Image (cartoon, rainbow, N blue to C red):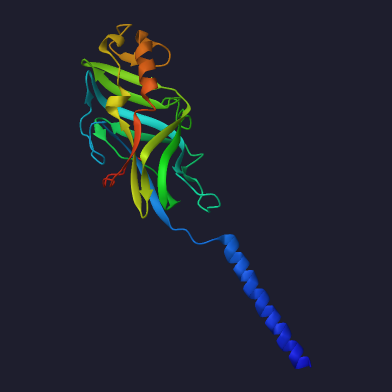
């Protein structure tokens, strides 16, 4: 009798274990594939083919020598998740860690890495990030308190463009970018879109000190040019596939 009871208890224990395992598997759901996604930043022009790089830093009357952008809270947004799916809709690339992206310095183009994260395979339709004022740097740094800083020459006269906007930028890519394996992506600033609509008549060295300033405080009387450039910021950014160059020294 004791032997029969022991066998019965053993069978009950095994059955309970199988049911528990089945329930756990159901709760956890199937394993969903993930891939490593890296995002770097660069500049280009809207006329160039996807993945193409530019060495041309001249746009109409501006010849660019330096561009820096301060960003944070970078995230990819997964498109079309189904109800009940275990795929998160957001892949956080960078958060609570402001970063100054050096895109051009002394006429040299760089491709700084923004971040790398594991992303669930699928189609991604948007990248969001925040333009933020650079604060965790020395006050004498040219980027201090700014989100965008650019140096150029304008008709041969030294020029500076500085922007202190703090806002979210949504980069939409309607065709979608498929992640189904390791992927390198570029957050790309289109130089022609950045300066689009800045008519030469809107820019001047108003105080005659030999430096053209375009900024938020109507320096040199260039408020219209500043308004045009800040209005361009969102449309000037896009996301492209691409292989990163070897030089990643500017982070």
Q: Residue furthest top?
A: 207
Mark count: 0
Q: Is residue 6 left or right of residue 241?
A: right
Residue visible at 30% across and 22% down in the picture: 195
Q: Is residue 1 left or right of residue 13?
A: right
Q: Residue furthest right?
A: 1
Q: Residue furthest front?
A: 83
Residue 34 higher or lower than 230, as above or below: below
In percent of width and height, residue 20 lies at 64, 70
In percent of width and height, residue 47 lies at 23, 31
Residue 23 higher or lower than 142, as above or below: below
Identify the image quadrant of residue 9.
bottom right
Identify the image quadrant of residue 33.
bottom left
On the question of residue 204 being in view, the answer is: no
Position of the C terminus by quadrant? top left
In percent of width and height, residue 166 lies at 47, 26
Q: Is residue 126 left or right of residue 62?
A: right
Q: Nearer the viewer, residue 10 or 73?
A: 10
Q: Is residue 12 left or right of residue 199?
A: right
On the question of residue 225 being in view, the answer is: yes
Residue 188 higher or lower than 11, as above or below: above
Identify the image quadrant of residue 227.
top left
Position of the N terminus by quadrant? bottom right
Residue visible at 42% across and 27% down in the picture: 147
């Amino acid at each position: 009798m004791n032997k029969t009871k022991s066998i019965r208890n053993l069978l009950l224990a095994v059955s309970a274990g199988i049911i528990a395992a089945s329930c756990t598997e159901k709760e956890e759901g199937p394993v969903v594939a993930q891939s490593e996604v890296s995002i770097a930043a660069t500049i280009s022009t809207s006329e160039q083919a996807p993945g193409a790089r530019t060495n041309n830093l001249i746009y109409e009357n501006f010849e660019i020598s330096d561009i820096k952008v301060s960003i944070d809270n970078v995230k990819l947004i997964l498109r079309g998740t189904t109800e009940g799916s275990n795929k998160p809709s957001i892949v956080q690339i960078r958060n609570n860690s402001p970063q100054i992206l050096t895109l051009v310095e002394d006429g040299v183009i760089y491709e700084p890495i923004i971040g790398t994260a594991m992303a669930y395979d699928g189609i991604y339709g948007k990248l969001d990030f925040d333009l933020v004022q650079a604060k965790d740097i020395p006050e004498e740094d040219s980027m201090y308190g700014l989100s965008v800083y650019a140096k150029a020459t304008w008709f041969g006269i030294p020029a500076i463009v500085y922007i202190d906007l703090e806002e979210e930028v949504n980069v939409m890519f309607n065709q979608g970018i498929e992640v189904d394996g390791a992927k390198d992506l570029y957050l790309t600033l289109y130089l022609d879109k950045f300066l689009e609509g800045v008519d030469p008549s809107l820019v001047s060295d108003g105080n005659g000190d030999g430096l053209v300033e375009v900024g938020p405080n109507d320096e040199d009387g260039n408020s219209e040019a500043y308004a045009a450039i800040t209005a361009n910021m969102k449309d000037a950014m896009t996301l492209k596939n691409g292989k990163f160059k070897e030089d990643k020294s500017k982070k």
